[in-house]
Amino acid sequence: MEHVRNLENRDNRARGQQVLAALRVLGIEPVVQERRWPRIRNIIVDFSPNSGAKKLLFSAHYDAAKGSPGANDNASGVAVLLGLCQKLRHLQPPIRLVFFDREEASSRVPRLGLLGSFYYVWKNNLKNIAAVYNLEFCGLGDCLGIWPVRAGQAKLAAVKEVEKAAIRRDIPFQPVDIPWPLLTSDHLPFRVKGVNNSITLSLLPAGQVPMLKKQLAAISIPRLLIGRKPALPQPFSVIHTDKDTSSRLSEDSLRLMLSLLLELIKSSSPSGS
Ligand SMILES: [Zn+2]
């Protein structure tokens, strides 16, 4: 939770500096992928940089929507990735972590977000990526949301693997199809470039799941496209508002997500260890 507090209420540049500082404390020297215009600073950590093995890519955006403290969206995802760094720093698993910049759309160009991740997929070779697990809203709730998963995508290896890990850790889970005009995240550029095994993982309060499913089932895409968005339950009702503060979050949720990722990594490694 300390990582969340270090990021919340800060501007995006300061949030990036906090991520770099936290990595340095762990003895990790990341690669910063930078562009001047539009200004982008992605922060990349490789645990086995020279390995030719297929990698799992874990990501979380560190920027926040303007006017929001950005605690659950998405200092929570960043905190979980930093927790993962602490666990993995002395090992050399075939894993890459990316802290993306500029996921949130600016207020001037409302639909133009995902800049950091689009820049990443444009500049990097994606051939050695086995799957992308992107994190959003990990600070509230105890039910794992896996999204977006349309009917035909339930058999994707990335979805299957994360469901197996959730079962082993006794974590309830719910694949949900969230249409992109309603909400999207940094998994999208990877899918656009053909990495279908790209999903986002979030935590939801279990009590909100039936309501969320009902709302999503009733969504009309044409209405969405003209900006008519339905009122969704928490955590969606709070993100991008001034109420997205760390005081609403729980460290148990952050630890739950971290334990899921560690389980996923354990089962995905060739030796199973
Ligand atoms: Zn977000």
Image (cartoon, rainbow, N blue to C red):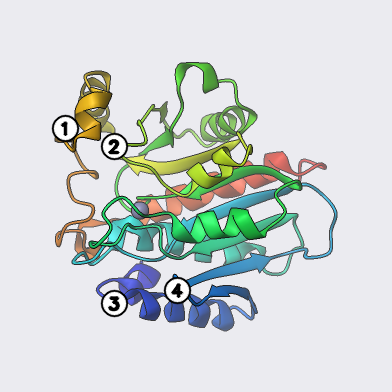
Rendered image quadrant of residue 218: top left
Q: Nearer the viewer, residue 64 or 168?
A: 64
Q: Position of residue 11 (x, y in %)?
A: 30, 76
Secondary element type, mark 4: loop
Badge 1 amino acid = Pro
Task: Give the residue at mark 3.
Answer: 10
Rendered image quadrant of residue 73: bottom left
Q: How crowded is mark 1: few (under 14 residues within 10 Å), some or many (20 or more)?
A: some
Residue at 15%, 34% in the rendered image: 228
Q: In this view, does 127 lie to the left or right of 24?
A: right
Name the front one of labels 3 and 4: 4
Sequence-first disc among 3 and 4: 3
The answer to whether the residue bearing label 4 lies less than 8 angstroms from the nearest atom of ligand 1 is no
Task: Give the residue at mark 1.
Answer: 230
Badge 2 amino acid = Leu
Sequence-first disc among 2 and 1: 2
Disc ID at residue 252:
none
Q: Residues within 10 Å of mark 2 (few under 14, many from 20)?
A: some
Marks 2 and 3: CB-CB under 8 Å? no
Sequence-first disc among 3 and 1: 3
Name the front one of labels 2 and 4: 4
Secondary element type, mark 1: loop
